[in-house]
């Protein structure tokens, strides 16, 4: 079952594929990279995202972003790497990005030793990026698409307001407002991996009010898209329900800074919403309504 973090992680890669290649030590122009088909589902599930880097010697970057502990992570990376090389006929660099300390896998050290009983042994090499160990400055000054990782990097709680302020200063200068909305939406969701909901609401409520419903709509859209994807994989009705549940959760988070904690009657009313058009109407009103009651009555 997918989570909002799965959809958000993939969205970050889609937003700035060249930024990821550059951040990992291979500076490249945006025109030289493109996302390619990561489907290896004839043998296993989809790889997270795969970026093709063109040039005299083309190669693929496979990124696997993890918010959960996975004891078989290194073997899964090897499987994806081999299948992608077979499918595309290109060398593949594999990188696992671990988003939080709670999901850390200490055994992941960049090498998986293969020691068959017959023949010579060998090693599969990969890279590990542990986000919480990297200084926030690496992401604040790095490629734009990695900016939402700054608040979950190596930053103290007392320094979070300064990190959000630095993010805002950089994003305010960007002319592509839909991209800015996507990055704020990703920041909102990823911060929930490490920080309490009330703190996230407090830090980002001003930003979200500034962006108005554009940011929330980006979050809602990701929830719907993830639900639709799951619908194709696991049954359309189940997938749509998952997308609706995630969208309702974020609607409650977005409304709390303005309206306060939702009363039980409001939570019950939102839980009963089963129509996507109704949910979208609520989303479009969350930043202009005066209260929870006003939101529910006027949409």
Image (spheres, rainbow, N blue to C red):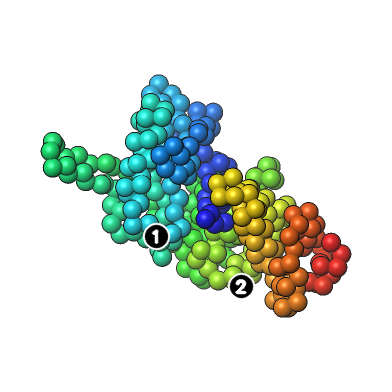
- Answer whether residue 26 is visible to the viewer in this image: no
Instruction: Looking at the image, tell me whether mark 2 or mark 1 is earlier in sequence order.
Output: 1
Residue 33 percent location from the top left of the image: 50, 31
Q: Which residue is mark 1?
A: 69
- Can the viewer see residue 175? yes
Q: Position of residue 40 (x, y in %)?
A: 44, 37
Q: Residue furthest bottom?
A: 264
Local crowd at mark 1 within 10 Å, few (<14), some, or many (≥20)? some
Q: Position of residue 163 (x, y in %)?
A: 55, 60
Residue at 49% from the left image edge and 51% from the top image edge: 139
At 44% from the left and 54% from the top, the residue drawn is: 66
Q: Which mark is residue 198?
A: 2
Q: Is residue 213 above or below residue 203?
A: above
Which mark is on residue 296? none
Q: CA distance from mark 2 to mark 1?
A: 25 Å
Image x and y of residue 88, in percent: 42, 28
Q: Secondary structure at mark 2?
A: helix
């Amino acid at each position: 079952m997918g989570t909002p973090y799965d959809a958000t992680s993939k969205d970050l890669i889609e937003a700035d594929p060249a930024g990821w290649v550059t951040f990992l030590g291979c500076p490249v122009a945006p025109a030289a990279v493109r996302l390619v088909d990561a489907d290896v589902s004839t043998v296993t599930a989809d790889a997270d995202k795969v970026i093709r880097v063109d040039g005299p010697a083309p190669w693929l970057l496979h990124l696997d972003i993890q918010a959960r502990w996975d004891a078989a992570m290194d073997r899964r990376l090897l499987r994806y790497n081999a299948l992608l090389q077979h499918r595309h006929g290109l060398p593949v660099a594999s990188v696992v990005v671990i988003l939080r300390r709670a999901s850390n896998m200490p055994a992941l050290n960049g090498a998986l030793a293969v020691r068959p009983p017959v023949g010579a042994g060998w090693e599969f090499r990969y890279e590990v990026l542990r986000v919480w160990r990297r200084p926030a400055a690496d992401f604040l000054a790095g490629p734009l698409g990695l900016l939402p990782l700054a608040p979950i990097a190596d930053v103290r709680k007392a320094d979070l307001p300064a990190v959000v302020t630095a993010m805002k200063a950089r994003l305010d200068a960007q002319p592509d407002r839909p991209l800015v909305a996507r990055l704020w939406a990703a920041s909102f969701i990823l911060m929930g991996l490490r920080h309490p909901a009330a703190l996230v609401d407090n830090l980002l409520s001003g930003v979200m009010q500034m962006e108005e419903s554009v940011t929330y709509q980006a979050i809602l859209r990701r929830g719907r898209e993830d639900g639709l994807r799951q619908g194709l994989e696991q049954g359309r009705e189940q997938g749509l329900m998952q997308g609706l549940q995630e969208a309702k959760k974020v609607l409650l988070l977005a409304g709390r800074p303005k309206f306060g904690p939702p009363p039980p009657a409001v939570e019950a009313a939102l839980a009963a919403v089963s129509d996507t058009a109704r949910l979208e109407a609520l989303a479009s009103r969350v930043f202009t309504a005066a209260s929870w009651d006003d939101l529910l009555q006027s949409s």
